Image (cartoon, rainbow, N blue to C red):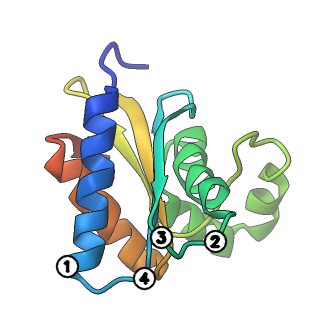
Amino acid sequence: MSDFRISLDKANTIITATFAKGREAGMKPLSCVVVDAGGHVIAFQRQDGTSFLRLDIARGKAAGALALGVNSRRIGEMAAERPSFIASLGHLAANGLIPVAGGVIVKGPDGLAIGAVGVTGDTSDNDEIAALAGIAAAGLTPL
């Protein structure tokens, strides 16, 4: 684990920029969570019109990525390659494990994970695009 962290201010910047990217691209209403390296929520917001399960989905994308050390897009690929393995992890992951794009690990200057961003609400590809825009706007680096 890195000595660096994502501050609340940076987390709010990520969420604001994620939503801005969604509006600019005409995406459906998004929900965005930023978690620390242990998968604990730093900040979460959902746009008007989203469903109530979105916190859990976004957190499952972000915390699941951290749990396996790869972005949630890769977890989706792993699920296709080894479905029994990924399916067996569901009950082990306290914050969920959502095997589709939209969960992006954030790394510190030392290259180690400092947290992750999870976005849900549109297609998984669009969720990931919005997450990456949020991370970039905060001056952070995705894994």
Taking the spot 76% from the left edge, 39% from the top edge, the residue there is 94
Say what secondary structure mark 1 lies in: helix
Q: Which mark is residue 24?
A: 1
Q: Amino acid at mark 1?
A: Glu
Does the CB distance between marks 4 and 3 fall below 8 Å?
A: no
For label 3, the SS is loop
Q: Nearer the viewer, mark 4 or mark 3?
A: 3
Let me know if residue 6 appears in the view: no
Nearer mark to the viewer, of 1 and 3:
3
Q: CA distance from mark 4 to mark 3?
A: 10 Å
Query: Hey, which quadrant is residue 75 in on the image?
Result: bottom right
Chain-order first, disc 2 or disc 1? 1
Binning the other alpha carbons within 10 Å of mark 1 as few (below 14), some (14 to 19) or many (20 upward) gives: few
Binning the other alpha carbons within 10 Å of mark 4 as few (below 14), some (14 to 19) or many (20 upward) gives some
Q: CA distance from mark 3 to mark 2?
A: 9 Å
> Which circle's residue, 4 or 2, is located before the other in the chain?
4
For the view shown, which residue lies furthest in the top direction? Answer: 3
Residue 16, percent from left and from top: 27, 54
Position of 12 relative to 134 (above/below) = above
Hey, what amino acid is under mark 2?
Answer: Ser
Residue 51 shown left or right of residue 143 in the figure? right
Residue beneath disc 3: 48
| Mark 3–mark 2 CB contact (< 8 Å) | no
- The residue carrying mark 2 is 51
Q: CA distance from mark 1 to mark 3?
A: 16 Å
Quick check: 65 above or below 58? above
What residue is disc 4 on?
28
Q: Where residue 17 sits in the image (x, y, percent)? A: 23, 57
Q: Earlier in the sequence, mark 1 or mark 3?
A: 1
Q: Amino acid at mark 4?
A: Lys
In this view, the residue farthest toward the front is: 48
